Amino acid sequence: MQETSLPPHDREMPLSEHLRELRDRVVIVLAVTLVLMAATFPFSPRIVDAILAHIVPASAKLIAYEPLELFKVRIIASFLVAVTVGFPLLVYEAFCFAAPGLYGHEKRFIYAVFPFSLLLFVVGAALAYFVTMPLFFNMVFNYEGSLASHELSVGQTFDIATNFMLGFGIVFQVPLVILLAIRMGLVRRKMLADSRLVVYGLLVGFAVFISPDPTMLSQLIVGVVLIVLFELSLLLSRFI
């Protein structure tokens, strides 16, 4: 049954009160994030070493080219850990802020979608970390051969790692977006299936946009993953 009245917990509030509530919730999230960063920072060298040792071949030599490069990398690693650990709090505060204005079916929709979205993000980031990045660095080094010195910047290499994981996490949201669009009637499955070549071109263009790489290797990997996810979405849409 579709609700026609206002949400049961909805009430009129001045804009200033909305902004004050939003500020309080943002302050809570930021405070917890800073505390988690401070707690993680002493262990950040181990985290950075573990990530880089897994994705970079043993023949590579990691060098800090700037005085504060290692410090910046430790800050970024601490922030990523803090955001990952504190992400449930961020979701909780955001939901509590929006919940009074949501209908029951809208809340149920969020309850159903969010776990799948989070799972897809984790799967994408894990695929990038355990499969794509080691393959990427090994292929690049083998292509360069003996002419390369194999000296890498610690900061740039860590940025590549985080960008890969973030990019793949976002890319893996594609099946959810497509399934929701079909479920809401925004697009038809047959139309997507009949326009495969056009969609493939758009997905490859998106891959080039989100993963700049002069070797074109990362764009190829992301493009192939996007196409596979698109076909998986069409297959799953048969059950909707």
Image: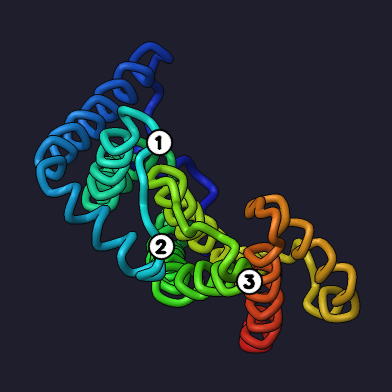
Q: Residues within 10 Å of mark 2 (few under 14, many from 20)?
A: some
- x and y percent of residue 97 in the render? 34, 36
| Horizontal side of residue 68 vs 200, given as left or right | left
Q: Quadrant of the C terminus?
A: bottom right
| Horizontal side of residue 159 vs 25, given as left or right | right
Residue closest to the eye, 203 or 118 = 203
Looking at marks 3 and 2 on the same chain, the residue that comes earlier in the sequence is marked by: 2
Residue closest to the eye, 140 or 176 = 140
| Horizontal side of residue 73 vs 45, given as left or right | right
In this figure, which colouring scheme has been used for the structure?
rainbow
Count the labels in the image.
Answer: 3
Q: Residue at 19% x, 49% y: name it.
A: 45
Q: Amino acid at mark 2?
A: Ala
Residue closest to the eye, 214 or 149 = 149
The residue that label 2 is drawn on is 60
Q: Amino acid at mark 3?
A: Tyr
Q: Which mark is residue 113?
A: none
Secondary structure type for disc 2: loop
Q: Residue at 48% x, 68% y: name it.
A: 133
Q: Residue at 52% x, 63% y: name it.
A: 168
Q: Are marks 3 and 2 in contact (CB under 8 Å)?
A: no
Q: Residues within 10 Å of mark 3 (few under 14, many from 20)?
A: few
Q: Amino acid at mark 1?
A: Tyr
The residue that label 1 is drawn on is 65
Looking at marks 3 and 1 on the same chain, the residue that comes earlier in the sequence is marked by: 1
C-alpha gap between disc 1 and disc 2: 15 Å
The residue that label 3 is drawn on is 143
